[in-house]
Image (tube, rainbow, N blue to C red):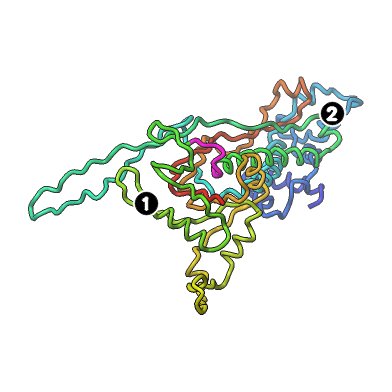
């Protein structure tokens, strides 16, 4: 889409503002158009009007030139830039979110997003009632059972964000790519920061689990649960089998009854990715029960789908970097139902809010338009019994 399309976009906006913005969002989402297809200066000329809605964009951009011979103050005071900020804000938002989502994508399956209105909260629950069912004879009253209290405290939430601004110089020199690049970088750093915090929680580098007023590390070698599987480096399907056996031994803490853990993902360093793909991608597994007996070999070929569960393999350069930053041994690997164990307590999702009109920043720093962007939340451990760390 050439820059001249700004004029066409202006006609659509005048005809139906809501429909224009909706179509623009959809076209940006599907990549039919991109933020860099538009000129920031052309958008200003097309969408900046005066208080009566009459075109003022061309005179406004001319007034940015120190050599302008007109009444600069009168032009600036007459400006209504709401439409310009709506359209350019959508381009800024798209450029930012593309990078934000790209950096978060590798970890999306590792946590459950939980909207909350609290700055840290106590999540109540009830412990299992255990095997308390009794025989009830005809016309007898059903017995009452006790349900023990249970709760998890989550950390306080934290706000993160930054600003994106279009200066007089950016608009005057039409540095469209510069402002789009800034928006992309903001999205990248927000997404990368959140991804790093989530990965550190999954790897046990940060430990935020506080259960019934006692803080615990996510991965334990002793009671009240054991989910560190030592000397179980990943090399064959037998290591997956060993991990599943450890899950089967984890019990509900107050009743001693087993809990149902169905692993869905495996998280590992890139150095183990091909090993994992060989294990899960094999069409068959050779089982040789007589391999160590010195007798004749008896081999059985079994479909791998019968032996090895289907697990999503999760690894990325960001995960590798967090292994290094957290001093986690590269051969350690993690397995479990991560969404049942980990949460992101979110006060509000990432948003883009425009700078108000006629702000002090316009006069003091020559800021023509600006947006602040940010989110508020914190990583939290809900129940570590559904994940497991395996060490070589």
Percent coordinates x, y for residue 374 in the rendering: 62, 34
| Residue 85 showing in the rendered view | yes
Q: Could you say which quadrant of the image residue 382 lies in? A: top left
For the residue labelled by badge 1, is the local secondary structure a helix, a strand or a loop? loop
Q: Magenta-highlighted stretch: main secondary structure? A: loop
Q: Extreme left residue here?
A: 139
| Residue 17 showing in the rendered view | no
Magenta stretch? 202-208
Dot 1 alpha-carbon crowd within 10 angstroms: few under 14, some 14 to 19, many 20 or more: some
Magenta region includes residue 205: yes
* Residue pointed to by mark 1: 259
Apparent side of residue 121 relative to residue 186 in the rendered image (left or right): left
Q: Nearer the viewer, residue 296 or 360?
A: 296
Percent coordinates x, y for residue 337 in the rendering: 48, 52
Cα distance between the residues tagged 1 and 2: 68 Å
- Label number found at residue 13: none
Q: Nearer the viewer, residue 257 or 113?
A: 257
For the residue labelled by badge 2, is the local secondary structure a helix, a strand or a loop? loop
Q: Nearer the viewer, residue 160 or 257?
A: 257
Asked if labels 2 and 1 touch by Cβ distance under 8 angstroms, the answer is: no
Q: Which residue corresponds to the image point at 86% horizontal and 35% vertical from the top-left?
A: 173
Percent coordinates x, y for residue 320 in the rendering: 65, 47
- Label number found at residue 64: 2
């Amino acid at each position: 889409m050439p820059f001249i399309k700004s004029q066409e976009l202006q006609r659509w906006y005048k005809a139906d503002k809501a429909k224009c913005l909706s179509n623009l969002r959809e076209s940006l989402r599907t990549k039919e158009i991109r933020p860099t297809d538009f000129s920031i200066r052309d958008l200003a000329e097309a969408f900046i009007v005066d208080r009566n809605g009459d075109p003022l964009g061309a005179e406004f951009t001319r007034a940015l030139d120190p050599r302008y011979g007109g009444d600069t103050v009168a032009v600036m005071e007459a400006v209504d830039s709401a439409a310009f900020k709506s359209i350019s804000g959508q381009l800024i938002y798209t450029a930012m979110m593309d990078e934000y989502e790209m950096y978060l994508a590798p970890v999306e399956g590792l946590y459950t997003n939980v909207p909350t209105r609290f700055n840290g909260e106590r999540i109540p629950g009830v412990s299992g009632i255990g095997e308390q069912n009794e025989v009830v004879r005809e016309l007898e009253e059903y017995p009452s059972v006790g349900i023990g209290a249970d709760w998890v405290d989550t950390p306080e939430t934290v706000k993160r964000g930054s600003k994106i601004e279009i200066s007089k110089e950016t608009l005057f020199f039409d540095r469209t790519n510069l402002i789009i690049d800034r928006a992309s970088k903001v999205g990248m750093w927000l997404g990368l920061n959140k991804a790093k915090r989530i990965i550190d929680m999954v790897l046990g580098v940060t430990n935020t689990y506080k259960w019934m007023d006692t803080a615990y590390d996510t991965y334990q070698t002793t009671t009240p649960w054991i989910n560190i599987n030592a000397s179980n480096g990943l090399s064959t399907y037998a290591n997956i089998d060993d991990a599943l056996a450890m899950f089967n031994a984890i019990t509900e803490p107050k009743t001693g009854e087993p809990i149902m853990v169905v692993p869905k993902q495996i998280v590992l360093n890139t150095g183990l990715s091909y090993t994992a793909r060989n294990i899960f991608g094999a069409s068959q597994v050779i089982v040789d029960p007589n391999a160590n007996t010195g007798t004749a070999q008896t081999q059985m070929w079994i479909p791998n789908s019968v032996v090895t569960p289907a697990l999503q393999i999760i690894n990325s350069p960001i995960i590798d970097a967090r292994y290094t930053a957290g001093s986690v041994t590269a051969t350690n690997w993690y397995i479990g139902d991560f969404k049942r164990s980990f949460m992101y307590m979110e006060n509000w999702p990432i948003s883009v809010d425009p700078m108000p009109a006629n702000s002090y920043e316009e006069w003091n720093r020559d800021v023509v338009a600006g947006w602040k962007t940010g989110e508020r939340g914190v990583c939290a451990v809900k129940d570590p019994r559904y994940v497991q760390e395996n060490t070589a």
